[in-house]
Image: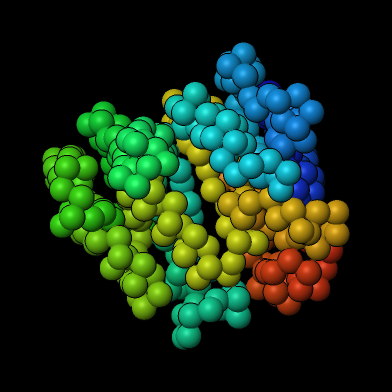
């Protein structure tokens, strides 16, 4: 049987993004040799430097071009020389919306108890996944100012939720819970007691869809209670489904209890199209060029990418290697405290594939 050949778009981005992407690509290359698949990578310069030179974020034509790839591997977007919001909205959100990456998938998994800030919690306790709706809600950017700059100014920000958008996210979460086949428990995380329009819709759709999945146990938790239980009883969770803004908030707390941003990876998923994978820690510009940033999050993102394109064995091997390194070799997951340089951590993962 001929080996598969994939096309991967690579966006190094800003700050330490290119450094961690280089280690992710190093691991991809080793995995392709070991597991017998081929891929071509194409590099793109979307990010702060290009914006400062040309005034361009990402054009509609460039977004069309990304649709011909099997997956996108992203380092980080965020440049100290560019006003906050311009790159995030002009590149990250624009790409997610244009490519209809309506799921943000965030595994929260602890690989080494020593790196967990929670007392008496280990890898058996922290192993869950957050499924975040990624294309609607308050991040849609809808709203208005009234009487801007005046004493009676009003700022209105709208949370926009469609039945179609909510249902496809919830359905994905049920399918994912079933496929994950751990505890087969799906928690809806929301705020039904206060946000009575948006969360009435989410709760109704959740209750309807769950009838089709009798093998999946369901429950509900308010978002504020969810943050509390993440700290107190993270072992309660298997898969969580939530909206865009709540998902954004709780996954950063998830990253901390799994050992920090250095290990946290995420996927922006279009199940019918092109998905994009990234470390979630941001561009960390203060560490640029110092060779001290932890590349494991980017390597885990590369593992998620492999899983998404159908190379499950390679993906499992990458995760196993990361677990081994994190649990036996590294002093810390924090930048500058790992006991190794960025490149050496990449080499360790390759050695242990």
Q: Is residue 351 visible?
A: no
**Residue 113 sits above or below residue 349 on the image:** below
Q: Quadrant of residue 233?
A: bottom left
Instruction: List the single residue furthest toward the front.
Output: 151
Find residue 35 and report its horizontal and vertical position in percent: 70, 41
Q: How many marks?
A: 0
**Residue 197 sits above or below residue 165 on the image:** below
Q: Is residue 173 left or right of residue 26?
A: left
Which residue lies at the image location 50% right of the left edge and 39% below the top edge?
A: 268
Instruction: List the single residue furthest toward the bottom.
Output: 120
**Residue 335 sits above or below residue 280 on the image:** below
Looking at the picture, tell me which residue is in the foreground, 311 or 128: 128
Q: Is residue 239 left or right of residue 204?
A: right
Q: Is residue 182 left or right of residue 323?
A: left
Which residue lies at the image location 27% right of the left edge and 35% below the top edge?
A: 161
Which residue lies at the image location 74% right of the left edge and 53% below the top edge?
A: 285
Quarter of the N terminus within the rendering: top right
Find residue 135 and report its horizontal and vertical position in percent: 40, 34
**Residue 256 sits above or below residue 143 on the image:** below
Find residue 78 and report its horizontal and vertical position in percent: 66, 44
Which residue lies at the image location 85% right of the left edge and 59% below the top edge?
A: 290
Quarter of the C terminus within the rendering: bottom right
Q: Is residue 162 visible?
A: yes
The color scheme shown is rainbow
Q: Quadrant of residue 46?
A: top right
Looking at the picture, tell me which residue is in the foreground, 54 or 179: 54
Find residue 67 and report its horizontal and vertical position in percent: 57, 20
């Amino acid at each position: 049987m001929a080996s598969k050949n994939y096309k991967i778009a690579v966006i190094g981005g800003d700050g330490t993004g290119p450094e961690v992407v280089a280690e992710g690509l190093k691991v991809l290359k080793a995995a392709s040799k070991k597991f017998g698949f081929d891929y071509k990578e194409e590099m793109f310069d979307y990010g702060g430097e290009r914006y400062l030179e040309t005034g361009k974020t990402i054009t509609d034509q460039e977004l069309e071009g990304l649709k011909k790839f099997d997956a996108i591997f992203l380092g980080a977007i965020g440049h100290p020389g560019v006003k906050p919001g311009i790159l995030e909205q002009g590149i990250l959100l624009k790409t997610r919306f244009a490519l209809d990456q309506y799921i943000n998938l965030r595994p929260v998994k602890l690989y080494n108890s020593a790196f967990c800030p929670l007392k008496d919690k280990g890898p058996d306790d922290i192993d869950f996944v957050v499924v975040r709706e990624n294309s609607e809600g308050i991040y849609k950017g809808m709203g208005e100012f009234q009487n801007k700059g005046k004493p009676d100014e009003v700022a209105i920000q709208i949370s926009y939720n469609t039945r179609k958008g909510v249902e496809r996210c919830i359905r994905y979460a049920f399918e994912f819970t079933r496929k994950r086949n751990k505890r087969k428990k799906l928690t809806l995380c929301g705020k039904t007691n206060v946000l009575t329009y948006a969360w009435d819709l989410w709760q109704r759709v959740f209750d309807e869809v769950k009838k089709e999945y009798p093998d999946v146990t369901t429950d509900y938790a308010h978002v504020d209670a969810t943050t509390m239980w993440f700290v107190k009883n993270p072992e309660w969770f298997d898969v969580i489904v939530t909206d865009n803004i709540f998902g954004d908030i709780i996954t950063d707390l998830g990253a901390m209890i799994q050992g920090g941003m250095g290990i946290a990876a995420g996927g922006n998923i279009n199940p019918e199209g092109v998905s994009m994978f990234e470390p979630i820690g941001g561009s960390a510009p203060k560490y640029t060029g110092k060779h001290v940033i932890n590349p494991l999050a980017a390597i885990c993102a590369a593992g998620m990418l492999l899983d998404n394109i159908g190379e499950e064995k390679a993906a499992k091997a990458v995760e196993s290697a990361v677990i081994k390194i994190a649990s036996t070799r590294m002093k810390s997951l924090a930048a500058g405290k790992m006991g190794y340089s960025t490149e050496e951590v990449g080499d360790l993962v390759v050695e242990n594939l």
